[in-house]
Amino acid sequence: MSTETEAPVAQTAGKIMLVGIGPGSVDHMTARARAAIAEADVVIGYVTYIKLVADLIEGKEIIRKSMTEELDRAVSALEAARAGKKVALISSGDAGVYGMAGPTYEVLFQSGWTPDDAVQVEIIPGASALNSCAALVGAPLTHDFCAISLSDLLTPWPTIARRLDAVAMADFVVALYNPKSGRRTRQIVEAQRLFLRHRRPDTPVAIVKSAYRRRENIVFTTLDSMSDADIGMLSTVLIGNSNTFVRNGLMVTPRGYANKYDMDGGATREGERAGRSLSTGLLGWLETLAAEHAAGDSIATLAARYRLPADYIQATLDEPWEAAAAAPTEETEA
Ligand code: SAH
């Protein structure tokens, strides 16, 4: 017979669950998000989000908070969890995207919490506004994209402006969160000004308000007129890259298949091979670069041609490289 003794169980420890509930409709909440709310003793969140899960919270302790009380919410959550309760902190979209996950960990660390603490933390992912808004307008994010919040409540404007400038220059598709509020009306105008320095005025822009909520509204416009559109606290602004187009009311950013395949027949273009990097991919480009340099193009000329830093061009030319044929690996992507 086994004489093993069980490790002493800590007093039923509390738990903090950071629940991303998606854009706002029950259908777009994950099963785990709903289960987490259902198993919670305490539910904390904005009134609007609490209303969205009204069916799950009967009999629970509810703490309704306003926008400016994020740190208070994290503190309340920790207090309740220390008292042995399971706490669900509700965020719209994903709790880790401009949400409560960051402030909560900051408050926890401040109080001396570590991952071994009796109070456990679970983050439950949800569809962020960029996922929801993209799904409603077509396929705008099928190539490199990034998110920038125009809120200067906690971030200096020069930081935001520098990021806008960098991603506009680098041709990312961009999702602008917190684009405008009653008091913050000029940020979107400044964002437009920075983008127009790098992108065509007719670059497609989609403005999605209240995705998957009752007052959902979608407007297609262009970069040069986006700041005239109706934009508010519940809008996300999607700005296309230089290849993004709108057709039949759908905003689409090409993946790049047209670079490799004939889009009519599906045949591979001259010089390209299925499952391999493009001829202008890294190895092919290095070959071209070396040849151009050998033919007399200076580092400065090459840097200007490819819009890359001269020291980077120099470093790649200095690095020994293998011929493109060397690596036989096939690539597959979902
Ligand atoms: N955690 C959230 C973002 C919170 S910041 C998420 O992952 O989506 C708040 C901003 O999110 C809003 O200003 C708006 O830009 C965007 N947003 C949130 N829900 C939205 C919705 N249903 N439709 C459109 N934009 C939304």
Image (tube, rainbow, N blue to C red):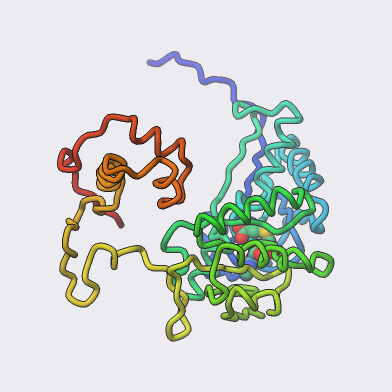
> Can you give x and y, in whole percent of width and height, for residue 212 in the image?
58, 74
| Left or right side of 71 for 263 | left
| Left or right side of 297 for 121 | right
Q: Residue at x 36, y 35 (%)?
A: 316
Task: Report which quarter residue 210 is drawn in.
Answer: bottom right
Task: Report which quarter residue 174 is drawn in.
Answer: bottom right
Question: Would you place residue 210 above or below residue 241 in this image?
Answer: below
The foreground one among 197 and 53 is: 197
Q: Quadrant of ligand 1?
A: bottom right
> Can you give x and y, in whole percent of width and height, for residue 218 in the image?
59, 80
In the rendered image, is residue 181 in sight? yes
The foreground one among 156 and 124 is: 156
In what quadrant of the picture does the N terminus appear?
top left
The foreground one among 263 and 72 is: 263
> Can you give x and y, in whole percent of width and height, for residue 295 in the image?
27, 44
> Can you give x and y, in whole percent of width and height, for residue 29 in the image?
55, 63
Question: Would you place residue 189 above or below residue 219 in this image?
Answer: above
| Left or right side of 220 for 106 | right
Q: Residue at x 47, y 75 (%)?
A: 251
In the rendered image, is residue 53 in sight? no
Count of numbered circles on the image = 0
Question: Would you place residue 33 above or below residue 236 in this image?
Answer: above
The foreground one among 307 and 76 is: 307
In what quadrant of the picture does the C terminus appear?
bottom left
Question: Would you place residue 304 above or below residue 317 in this image?
Answer: below
Furthest toward the bottom, the residue is 248
Task: Report which quarter residue 81 is drawn in.
Answer: top right
| Left or right side of 117 for 172 | left
